[in-house]
Image (cartoon, rainbow, N blue to C red):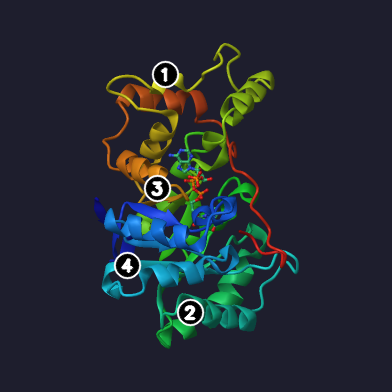
Amino acid sequence: MDYTTLGRTGLKVSVAGLGCGGFSRLGLGAGGSEADAIAIIRQAIDLGVNLFDTAAAYGTESVLGKAVKGVPLDQVVVCTKAPFSWSSGRADPQGIVASLDKSLRELDLDHVDVYQLHGIPPAHYDHALEALAPVLLREKEKGKFRFLGITETAPNDLDHTTLHRAAEDKVWSVVMVGFSMLHQNARDRVFPRTRAHGVGTLLMFAVRQIFSQPGRLAETLRALAEDGRLPADLGDDPLGFLVHPGGASSVIDAAYRYVRHEPGVDVVLFGTGSPEHLRTNIASLLKPPLPEADRRRVGELFGHLVGVGLDAPHLTRAGNVR
Ligand SMILES: NC(=O)c1ccc[n+]([C@@H]2O[C@H](COP(=O)([O-])OP(=O)(O)OC[C@H]3O[C@@H](n4cnc5c(N)ncnc54)[C@H](OP(=O)(O)O)[C@@H]3O)[C@@H](O)[C@H]2O)c1
């Protein structure tokens, strides 16, 4: 495993981070058992992963808590998130503190490393900054978490308005941002600011469904070509040029390597319930950058696209973003 520093938190983190949410939810989303989900986390630890991201909305906090039981706390970086209520459009500060306490009980920990506000839409950023952050910082002083973070709602904030602001607002030490071969605008909108202010970055949406579901990529790119947003002559395998000796071993290998080496990216999160995907994704993230000519072509072909492949988030019954 390679390790890096998570911005000004100073935390030493693995460049590959295991996401315990997304469509997979450690395999629970596809009907996997809790024992298998715990085994995935333990396998990740054995392979050197030390950063794990969960959330109140994912239903995986207790699984993560069980999996890290007995692991010395200075060897894992646990990140979880406060729910943001989409149904009411606003999250109540007292409700968020109660959720933090519940998360600690679920995780069976007395503190977490990073506590994040989950999926804050631009329209509610002022509320997050002025009403929620001060209340949470008081809980931080009590020792319930070490660093405050914020995550964007990528499908509903295509130009990263929330993080564009958050990177400069000092209270957030860590942000979670969507970036992929088909949604590259964090390069201009977010990373220059997070780098300038020492904000740690956790990356999401590198693969999601567009790269992992058979047929989704070709179908989406065909529709974009029909709309005139991509050249008409890209053919049936528009990303096939990335796979060659000396290049990527698969399009998914390319997708993870592309984001991993972007300046400003600290940790690439990936979600999986598959031991094989866990192994190959870590292997991809530890490989060198894609050949420069391939990287350049991805920029030339797809750099203008915005919001492609950002599957809408799940909503829990309570209306929280997952
Ligand atoms: N707003 C937010 O705060 C927010 C939003 C989204 C995500 N996140 C965080 O970011 C994490 C990562 O997001 P993500 O889960 O969407 O990750 P991702 O790595 O972009 O996509 C993972 C999806 O692709 C599949 N997959 C993974 N590796 C594969 C491989 N090698 N070959 C084929 N399929 C593969 C997974 O299913 P399998 O089980 O089949 O591997 C899963 O469905 C989440 O777990 C969560 O912690 C946060």
The x and y percentages for residue 5 are 28, 59
Q: Along the polypeptide, which appears first: circle 4 or circle 1? A: 4
Instruction: Please state which amino acid type lies under the numbered disc 3.
Output: Pro
Residues at discs 3 and 2 in contact (Cβ within 8 Å): no
> Is residue 86 visible to us here?
yes
Residues at discs 4 and 3 in contact (Cβ within 8 Å): no
Instruction: Please state which amino acid type lies under the numbered disc 4.
Output: Val
State which mark lies toward you, 4 or 3.
Answer: 3
Calculate the distance from the C-alpha at mark 1 to the C-alpha at mark 2: 47 Å
Residue extending furthest toward the bottom: 142
Element on which disc 2 rests = helix
Check the picture and name the quadrant holding the C terminus: bottom right
Q: Which residue is mark 4?
A: 76
The x and y percentages for residue 317 are 72, 64
> Is residue 114 visible to us here?
no
Q: Residues within 10 Å of mark 4 (few under 14, many from 20)?
A: many
Element on which disc 3 rests = helix
Q: Which mark is residue 241?
A: 1
Q: Along the polypeptide, which appears first: circle 2 or circle 4? A: 4
Residue extending furthest toward the left: 2
Q: Which residue is mark 2?
A: 104
Element on which disc 4 rests = loop
Q: Along the polypeptide, which appears first: circle 4 or circle 3? A: 4
Q: Along the polypeptide, which appears first: circle 3 or circle 2? A: 2
Q: Along the polypeptide, which appears first: circle 1 or circle 2? A: 2
Query: Between 44 and 287, which is closer to the camera in this rendering?
Result: 44
State which mark lies toward you, 3 or 2.
Answer: 3
